[in-house]
Image: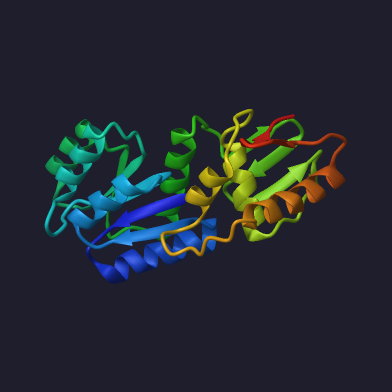
């Protein structure tokens, strides 16, 4: 999953980015003012935006308003100070999905982010199920037929993204755009490598294939 953090306090933004990268394996982009945040939100496909309310150049409410005017339904979590309740109500009414007040616990923030991403993908449970495959988004573990499947961090990220869209065709370009941040180096065959590893490990743990290739289109995860 790819997350945009729009926060002018650089140390806070970097701490949140580090926590999301290390605990959830998310790809993170950062913007430090409202104008940059709005530009990045309109230029890249994000699964989640973390948006500070008080920003230089453009405030959080204006950024959110413009994002929603563009037709984007990306989940937005607002960061706010405790004395900004009236502004938070306006933001929620304007299309924000949730908010958390500063100072906040990083564990709570990560739980909210994961929940919003799941809801944004049409999922509510923390465990994603496709046939006999179970993916726990809370502790990043995978089981097939009840047995653990050991994946690399990147293999897990590819599988989780596919599991959020079971039965849908997901192109290689879409996977690259959602699993890497703004600075990734574009290696053309990297997705094929992870898909190959996933197929081998998942097939060894079950009786049927779960990942299907549609030539010229992409990949599909289905039982």
Instruction: Judge left or right: residue 196 versus residue 121.
Output: right
On the question of residue 1 being in view, the answer is: no
* Number of callouts: 0
Residue found 48% across the figure and 49% down from its top: 177
- Percent from the top left, x then y, of residue 3? 41, 52
The residue under the point 86% across, 47% down is 204
Is residue 45 in view?
A: yes
Is the image coloured rainbow, by chain, by secondary structure, or in one colour? rainbow
Q: Quadrant of residue 97?
A: top left
Left/right of residue 70 with respect to residue 218 in the rendered view: left
183 is higher (above) or lower (below) than 35: below
Nearest the camera: 189 or 94? 189
* Quadrant in which the C terminus appears: top right
Displayed quadrant of residue 152: bottom right
| Image quadrant in which you'd find residue 7 | bottom left
**Residue 183 falls left or right of residue 211:** left
Q: x, y (%) of residue 96?
A: 27, 38
x then y, percent, for residue 81 = 19, 55
Q: Going 46% across and 48% down the picture, which residue do you hit?
A: 111
């Amino acid at each position: 999953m790819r997350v945009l953090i729009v926060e002018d306090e650089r140390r806070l933004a970097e701490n949140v980015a580090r926590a999301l990268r290390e605990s959830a394996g998310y790809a993170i982009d950062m913007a430090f003012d409202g104008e940059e945040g709005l530009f990045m939100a309109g230029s890249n496909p994000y699964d989640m935006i973390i948006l500070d309310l008080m920003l230089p150049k453009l405030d959080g409410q204006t950024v959110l308003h413009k994002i929603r005017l563009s037709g984007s339904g990306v989940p937005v979590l607002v960061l706010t100070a405790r004395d900004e309740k009236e502004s938070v109500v306006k933001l929620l009414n304007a299309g924000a999905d949730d908010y958390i007040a500063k100072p906040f616990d990083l564990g709570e923030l990560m739980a909210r982010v994961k929940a919003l991403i799941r809801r944004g993908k049409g999922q509510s449970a923390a465990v994603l199920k496709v046939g006999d495959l179970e993916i726990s988004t809370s502790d990043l573990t995978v089981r097939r037929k009840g047995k653990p499947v050991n994946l690399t961090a990147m293999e897990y990220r590819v599988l989780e993204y596919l599991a959020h869209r079971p039965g849908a065709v997901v192109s290689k370009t879409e996977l690259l755009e959602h699993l890497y941040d703004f600075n990734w180096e574009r290696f053309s065959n990297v997705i094929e490598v992870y898909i190959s590893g996933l197929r081998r490990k998942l097939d060894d743990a079950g009786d049927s294939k779960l990942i299907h290739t549609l030539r010229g289109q992409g990949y599909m995860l289905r039982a």
